[in-house]
Amino acid sequence: MRDDRIDARKEATRLTEPVEEAGNLARKLGLDPYPVNYWIVDHDEMNELIAYGGFQRRYPHWRWGMAYDRQRKQDQFGMGKAFEIVNNDNPSHAFLQESNSLADQKAVITHVEAHADFFANNEWFGLFGDGQGDDRADLDAAAMLERHAETIKGYVEDPDIDRDEVERFIDAVLCLEDTIDQHRAFARAGERRERDAPPDLRERLDELDVSDDVRRHAFDEEWLDELAESERAKARLEDPHTDVLAFLLEHGRQYDEESGKAVEFEPWQKDVLEILRTEAYYFAGQKMTKVLNEGWAAFWESTMMSDENFAEDDEFVTYADHMARVLGSPGLNPYKLGMELWEYVENVTNRREVVDKLLRVEGITWRNFHDVIDFDEIEALLAPDPAIATIAPETLDALDPSDPRVDADTLERARAGDVDVTRYPWKVLTTVGLAERHFSLCKPQNRGFLRRIRRSELERLSRYMFDDAKYDTVADAVADVDYGVGWRRMRELRESHNDVTFIDAFLSEEFVSENDYFTYEFSQATGDFRVASDDPDDVKKKLLLQFTNFGKPTVAVYDGNFDNRNELLLGHQYNGISLDIEQAKRVLERTYDLWGRPVNLMTIVKEYDEHELEIARRRNREPTPTEVGKRIRYDGERFETHDLDPDLEERIAANDIDYDTKPDDWLA
């Protein structure tokens, strides 16, 4: 047996207990993850897995080698170490690098358990499978991707098929892999919705029993044909196909040089296109929830490793360094943003629960709340019961087995010496007990959160208090606080949201101010990026733009018979950000390979007057662009750019959506 395999087996043995106990703790905290299979891999195997998107087998293509080389160099030159990778599957499969320290292994194991919970319970992942939780028991992504790999490998190795043709076809599809309708449940292309054809005037004339003579003189067949086509074209423009790959699968063709015509796809081409479209839908859930998913995993990893001391004393410094590097990564960091948003949701929910009780105390109203409340007293009253907060072998007798916060069966075994409560004190508690033990408003970093509540929120909470229950004292009110409300709210939101909906709902003025978020923009006047705004609305706009359609332009099919010439008409749904025109042209070249006939792209560009631009540079302000609709056409050989008809421009232009967050006047 090779030495490295022996090392992997030793590492697996060392991690047996942490894996088991991390899963137990996750469930005690209220999570409901898929079962997780853990695998120990070496440095090169980890890089391969990352290149393959977390799976061991993928179809043959040059992209994987490029991704592997990038990851290897990133690791080699200290630009980021891969600790683990986990995939969305039931059971999930997680791969741990054998060179990790025990502290790092524990960190990634707790992180993985939270990911597996998110995979199992978030509805955006359920769009690909058959629902959530137990309803997705038949999800076997690894087997699906392996089947896909074998199928495409067969085409690559088929002597009757040119390997370069297969690779070129894959390249073309991958240019459009994000042009799917990720908000709908996955369905085979033939199962997708069909448009309702607009009514033909002939049918109406039949219903009216118009005579043949009148029809012949007033409604000739050529005019009726033109009217019907016009109505169909209008319907297509008003209801574009958002799943471009499905449209190409149903209607696409390839250009045949010998005949000079567009001909049907070969069977292998339709098969490859269907495979890549399926994989695009499978991975869409991960792309749509990157911030939420990583933030969720980071939150519960921190709760387990730090708050519940899953990292032992001699491991904690290593773990703290690990977490600091993860959260301190530069740029838009999904771990940091996601974790801060989840913590904010927890704190806001807990604060509302406490305030709801305090506003029911005799003599306390939303108007005098900040004047009469002793926040230090509230903090002391909210502190967890000492019997729950500090658990050790010598304190077990203080626990009441009938207490809903206590796991009676485990407590009995712990008193008999069969449970190590020194290492795992959480074992004798229920989820209710752990919620009190880790109530967020009692943590040092959150101690000012309650007193920062605004009068406007107090008034709103007071307005919607429909029952008239009252407390005689503040102590009575605090004693009735539900410590688990924050975690329950988080689990509810974890089921229904993606990054866009979550940011839209919870990125508040308070969050932006407390966490120092701001926007930056490219300045046409200076030719570089500058801080533009710290206004909460601007920050939200910028983040929504970053995550809408995976941060990529939204493109849909508006017509498959544009200008009645079998040309494809795509529309860039403009939101204030212009396309990179040269990159768009490269994509059109690839799209032509999937349509076999000329392709068109509608978009809106920003044009700047050189004189105005020069004046703006001198005055250190931003010039005002003119937005102009353009249609770019590619016929397989050359590009043409046409002005866009006003009615088409209206179809793709943003209405009241404006993602431009630059201030009117830039500071010098």
Image (cartoon, grey):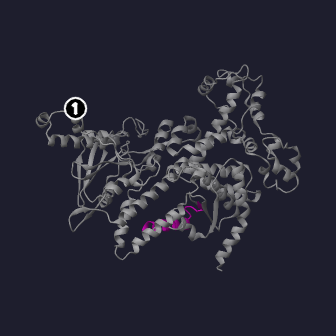
Residue situated in front as seen by the camera: 257 or 462: 257
Q: Residue 564 location, x and y as percent? A: 21, 49
Q: Residue 148 location, x and y as percent? A: 46, 65
In the displayed structure, 469 sits above or below 27; it is above
For disc 1, the marked residue is 208
Residue situated in front as seen by the camera: 386 or 405: 405
Residue at x-position 37% and y-position 40%: 622
Residue 134 showing in the rendered view: yes
Q: Residue 315 location, x and y as percent? A: 73, 59
**Left of 303 or right of it: where is 511?**
left
Residue at x-position 60% and y-position 51%: 133
Magenta region includes residue 313:
no
In the displayed structure, 326 sits above or below 198; it is below
In the displayed structure, 159 sits above or below 591; it is below
Amino acid type, mark 1: Leu
Q: Quadrant of the image for the N terminus?
A: bottom right
User: Going by the picture, which residue comes out furthest to the top?
Assistant: 363
Q: Quadrant of the image for the C terminus?
A: top left
**Left of 533 or right of it: where is 443?**
right
Residue 535 showing in the rendered view: no
The magenta stretch is 61-85
